[in-house]
Amino acid sequence: MRAGGSRQHKGLRTVLGMPLIEWNLRALLRFGFGHLFVAVNARERELATWIDSHGRALAQSQSARLEILVEAEPLGTIGAVASLPREIDDAVIVNVDNLTSLDLKELAHYHRELRAAATIATHVQPFPIPFGMLELAEQRVIAYREKPTLSIPISSGTYVLHRRAIDRVPAGRRLDVPALIEALLQAGEAVLAYPHQEPWIDVNDEAALAHAQQLFSGGEP
């Protein structure tokens, strides 16, 4: 989003006057999570300052604790979980640039009930195909669909990790979610999907920011 002209960290861009980081912290607090961790790159001083002041005050107002996990070097989309305290058995992971109405407490309950190593919140996303799509049986064309829309299950960027998944994340090394999930699958661990139909948006550019304003104009996600 900085490439789109903003000098602010993505997490400090606002939807309906509230920073994305605050939307996500409020969601976690609303669903009763009492110990929050925020991973921040050491270079993102403006974001770290916001979290250390406004973020901590928000958590304390709900009798919750907030800790900052500082990344000296970028650790990818999941590398920071290696710094979580050993006593944490399950961790709900949200991304600052995702907004959703998903019930995070129910997601965590589902994960624990089924004893998964990892659970991925999943929704169906329609993708318009800009070309004619053929269905084939070897060389025979059995259908021709002009510019169809395909509905595909995708990750909602929200996860729950059990300790046996967290322990697969190497300390101090970059790791992204797809690589962790692949390692779990290769090890025969249970990785589950949590299907939902709640509003969701990846606020990844200026157009998505404007869409988020419309999507959640009726209240908190």
Image (cartoon, grey):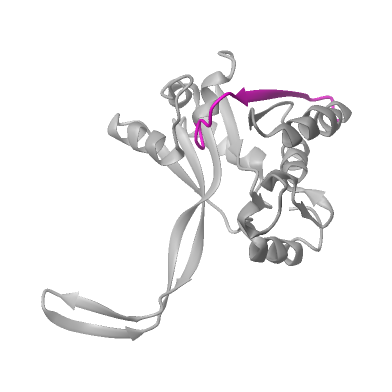
**Is residue 199 visible to the viewer in this orientation of the structure?**
no
Magenta residue check for 132 = no
Quadrant of the rendered image containing residue 55 = top right
Image point (75%, 67%), residue name:
214
Residue 34, percent from left and from top: 74, 26
- On screen, 17 above or below 172? below
Residue name at image x 65 percent, y 41 percent: 104
Front residue (pair 92, 176)? 176
Q: Residue 208: image x %, image y %?
A: 65, 62
In-image side of 137 versus 156 (left or right):
left
Q: Is residue 76 magenta?
A: yes
Residue 59 visible at all: yes
Q: Is residue 197 left or right of residue 63?
A: left
On screen, 121 above or below 203?
above
Whole-percent x and y of residue 93?
A: 59, 36
Q: Which is more toward the observer, 62 or 76?
A: 76
- The residue that appears at 56% across and 54% down in the rendered structure is 196
Q: Residue at x 35, y 31 (%)?
A: 189
Q: Is residue 122 left or right of residue 221?
A: left
Establish if 123 lies above or below 80. below
Q: Is residue 11 left or right of residue 49?
A: left
For the N terminus, the quadrant is bottom right
Q: Which residues are magenta?
A: 62-78
Judging depth in this view, the residue of 150 and 190 nearest the camera is: 150
Q: Position of residue 69 (x, y in %)?
A: 64, 24
Res 3 quadrant in image:
bottom right
Q: Is residue 125 above or below residue 149?
A: above
